[in-house]
Image: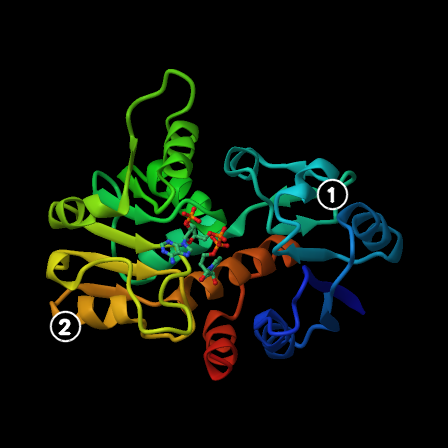
């Protein structure tokens, strides 16, 4: 039997086990997906190697620290975080499938990102992955964050040393003006999670926007509800969550993921 899993602390409420196990079931694979809550990342990676674990997702608080214990691919290195470890190589390789997950969520909704003007709210872990993805897909990215210094540091990382001004940094007070001219809006803050709050004033939203919320609890956040009421295309947080899992599954197994079955298993638990 092949063992995959999730390393984090806490991981008790993770939706990844049912999503991955639905894929194993659909493809008749002899595999299990297990959650682990280690105290430290180094022994956990060594232990996983020794036990022959095939692949691990990694979440808070280990996404950054795990970089030192795996061979990160160039995207994970630029983002500064790994959420997927593949143990089929020695040393194991580290990837960031949050970025590909967000890209595939836009693709699934026929939203092209090339040459677009995007506004990204947030500068934490999820935002870092989305910022690099948007820039790599050809969008300009205005990053607005409560702590402006974090937005500045993320914009500098995206632009690279002496690079183009693909990304700019802003405070949340600039959102109305930024969003009025934007094609794409992503909320990657935790605002709206289990609450009826939104980081973006409703008046700024318009019908020419595609709005993605990384928050998946509730599925229809206030931001998405208000965007939808103004005629915008909306993409809920379950799409990014689904596709980061799909990309991890495909990386570990080399097989096409049964996306519909994984989506159904995930949405049943959200
Ligand atoms: P994080 O690293 O802790 O970052 C949190 C972000 O939210 C920061 O930008 C922070 O701003 C901002 N923020 C928090 N409280 C705020 C408030 N009251 N007002 C304004 N801004 C506030 O968290 P994360 O890992 O990036 O996760 C962010 C959200 O994305 C969470 O809801 C998480 O569940 C979700 N997420 C979804 C997926 C998915 O696949 N759908 C993947 C990853 C994360 P400061 O910098 O000023 O503190």
Q: In which quarter of the image is residue 7?
A: bottom right
Q: Relative to 263, is 43 on the left or the right? A: right
- Residue 139 visible at all: no
Q: Is mark 1 on a helix, strand or loop?
A: loop
Mark 2 nearby-residue class (10 Å; few <14, some 14–19, many ≥20): some
Q: Which residue is drawn at 46% across and 74% down?
A: 263
- Residue beneath label 2, please? 229
Ligand 1 contact, mark 2 (Cβ < 8 Å): no
Q: Which mark is residue 14?
A: none
Question: Residue 77, how many percent across, how many down?
Answer: 57, 34
Q: In the rendering, at what x and y percent does residue 53 appear? A: 79, 58
Spatial CA distance of label 1 from label 2 is 46 Å
Residue 183 or 175: which is nearer the viewer?
175
**Quick one: SS at disc 2?**
helix
Identify the residue under disc 1.
Answer: 92
Q: Where is residue 111 in the image (x, y as percent from the top left)?
A: 25, 55
Q: Residues within 10 Å of mark 1 (few under 14, many from 20)?
A: some
Q: In which quarter of the image is ligand 1?
A: bottom left
Question: Is tag 1's residue or tag 2's residue first in the polypeptide sequence?
Answer: 1
228, 199: nearer the viewer: 199
């Amino acid at each position: 039997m092949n063992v995959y899993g999730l390393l984090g602390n806490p991981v008790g409420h993770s939706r990844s086990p049912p999503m991955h196990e639905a894929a194993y079931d659909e493809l008749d694979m002899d595999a299990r997906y297990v959650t682990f809550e280690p105290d430290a990342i180094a022994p956990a990676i060594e232990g996983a190697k020794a036990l022959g674990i095939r692949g691990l997702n990694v979440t808070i608080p280990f996404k950054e620290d795990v970089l030192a214990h795996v061979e990160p691919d160039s995207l994970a290195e630029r983002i500064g975080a790994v959420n997927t470890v593949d143990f089929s190589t020695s040393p194991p390789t580290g990837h960031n499938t949050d970025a590909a997950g967000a890209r595939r969520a836009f693709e699934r909704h026929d939203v092209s990102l090339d040459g677009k003007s995007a506004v990204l709210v947030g500068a934490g872990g999820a935002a870092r992955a989305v910022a690099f993805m948007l820039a790599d897909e050809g969008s300009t990215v205005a990053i607005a964050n409560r702590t402006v210094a974090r937005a500045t540091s993320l914009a500098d990382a995206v632009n690279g040393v002496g690079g183009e001004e693909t990304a700019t940094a802003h405070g949340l007070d600039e959102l109305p003006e930024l969003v009025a001219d934007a094609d794409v809006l992503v909320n990657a803050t935790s605002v709206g999670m289990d609450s009826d709050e939104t980081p973006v004033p409703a008046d700024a939203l318009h019908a020419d926007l595609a709005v993605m919320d990384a928050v998946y609890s509730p599925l229809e956040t206030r931001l998405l509800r208000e965007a939808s009421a103004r005629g915008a295309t909306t993409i809920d947080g379950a799409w990014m969550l689904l596709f980061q899992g799909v990309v991890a599954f495909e990386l570990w197994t080399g097989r096409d993921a049964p996306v519909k079955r994984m989506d159904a298993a995930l949405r049943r638990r959200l």
